Amino acid sequence: MTSKLTADGLSAWYGPKKAIEDISLAFEEHAATAIIGPSGCGKSTLIRCLNRMHETLPKTRVEGKVLLDGEDVYEQDAVAVRRRIGMVFQKANPFPTMSVYDNVAAGLRLNGTRDRKVLDRAVKGSLVKAALWDEVKDSLGKPGVGLSGGQQQRLCIARALAVEPEVLLMDEPCSALDPIATAKIEDLIFDLKKEYTVVIVTHNMQQAARVSDSTAFLYLGRLIEVGGTRELFEHPREELTEKYITGRFG
Amino acid sequence: MPERAERKALEKGLNTLNENMATMAELSELAIRKAVDGLSRGDRATAEEVFTLDQELYGLQEEIEGTCVDLLALHAPVARDLRTITTSLKITTDLDRIGRYAKDIAEMSLQFPEGPPPGLSDLAKIPQMAEHTIRMVDTVIRAFVRRDADSVRNILEVDDEVDRLNDEVFAEIVGHMEAGRLAIVAGARYVLVARHLERIADHAVNIGMRVVYMVSGETLPRIRAADRAKRPPG
């Protein structure tokens, strides 16, 4: 396995508050890595640093490197980085005034693609990859917000895939979904990781165990342990990890 | 991370599991002790007690299985909790089998209604083998109850001694039968007793290896004695 993306001595601040500290973590290509840890441990901050979303908030700062194919993303154009490293958020956020089609095509249009045939092909391809095509192929012109919660989240995944990213960051993508919609997203992650490098932040331990190949445990902004998911959930090396995953914390 | 109330429910279930496992372990050890004692004295009442213990063990095994399935289904345990539950599920079968072999040995006592036939007192190796086997069972049960992996890491080597004694018992019994000092029927039954003891020791090995996994997460390699002998020390 080779590392697609690597955090190297990564620290991040919100104003004076340090949210993550000196995190070094490699994300394998064509694999899913789960990031777990209690609320406020820095999981979301970490993945927001990976595609330079963290710096979009005021008074934030990042130190260290994020290497994408060996090149530091902080020495590249931020917009180009975010095209290569897509993101899906906790709450599905389709553009409220746009149709299903336009939601998926939005990223491509922003990048200047106008050719209808190219857009049609990309929209269909992305919706197929997001396992949503069969459900929306006859209602592409209807508003994206008219879909169910699970469908909206898959629409957001399709939107992220349309610009052909190499890495997909998912920040608690199922936390607002019911078990059936969650299962569909988890199935999707299984398929997506064959083609993309997937990083998923989750509060759901069983979800991390089900979908990821590696799991990283963060606590108070520090990386406590990272390892194969099976090993980490069966016999973690660190006592702190054991306490967290078995609920013996606090 | 499990919620506080859920953690409490899991904790309660794990406590019940541990108590039942400790009871089952103690009863299975008691069953072998009584079975061996009953055989050496040809005591029918002791054999009956072993039959009752075997029933108890079976009932406990069913209860433990139910608890394990509930804990797995309701709490999706991980790490030490998961290892404790899966190990208990496996060990409970070993303990039940130990109880069954104890029952089989106790049944032998009933084959000699007039007490043990002349010859048992000459078969010094059977009591020796029984003692060694019981000690093994006692060691692994203590290790399980105390969550002590270190005391059973060498359990495969300890079992070699029982295997060696089994071969010696066989040779001893055949020798007595050939010399006409032991009836064929009695000799054949004693060979079976030795075989049962040897199987009990094998189940003790299973338990010991699983205790190591439960405590440390480490799976010990199961290497045959002949292959172990070829390995360099340490």
Image: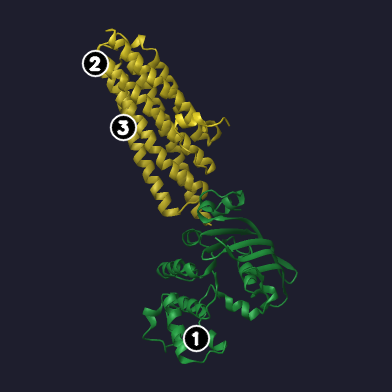
Chain colours: A green, B yellow
Taking depth in this image into account, of A130 and B226 the one nearest to the observer is: B226
Q: Amino acid at mark 3?
A: Gln
- Distance CA(mark 3)–CA(mark 2): 28 Å
Q: Residue at x 33, y 25 (%)?
A: B50
Q: Position of residue A58 (x, y in %)?
A: 70, 78
Q: Amino acid at mark 2?
A: Val
Label 3 crowding class (10 Å Cα cut-off): few <14, some 14-19, many 20+? some
- Distance CA(mark 1)–CA(mark 2): 87 Å
Q: Against B232, is A117 above or below?
A: below
- Secondary element type, mark 3: helix
Marks 1 and 2 share the same chain? no
Q: Nearer the viewer, mark 3 or mark 2?
A: 2
Is residue A3 shown to the viewer in this render? yes
Q: Position of residue A180 (x, y in %)?
A: 40, 68
Label 1 crowding class (10 Å Cα cut-off): few <14, some 14-19, many 20+? many
Q: Say which chain tag 3 marks.
A: B
Q: Position of residue B57 (x, y in %)?
A: 35, 33
Q: Which residue is under mark 3?
A: B55
Q: Which residue is under mark 1?
A: A105
Q: Say which chain tag 1 marks.
A: A
Q: Which residue is under mark 2?
A: B185
Q: Residue at x 40, y 15 (%)?
A: B125
Q: Earlier in the sequence, mark 3 or mark 2?
A: 3
Taking depth in this image into account, of B71 and B178 the one nearest to the observer is: B178
- Left or right of residue B221: residue B189: left
- Secondary element type, mark 1: helix
Q: Quadrant of residue A110?
A: bottom right
Q: Against A224, is A4 above or below?
A: below
Marks 3 and 2 share the same chain? yes
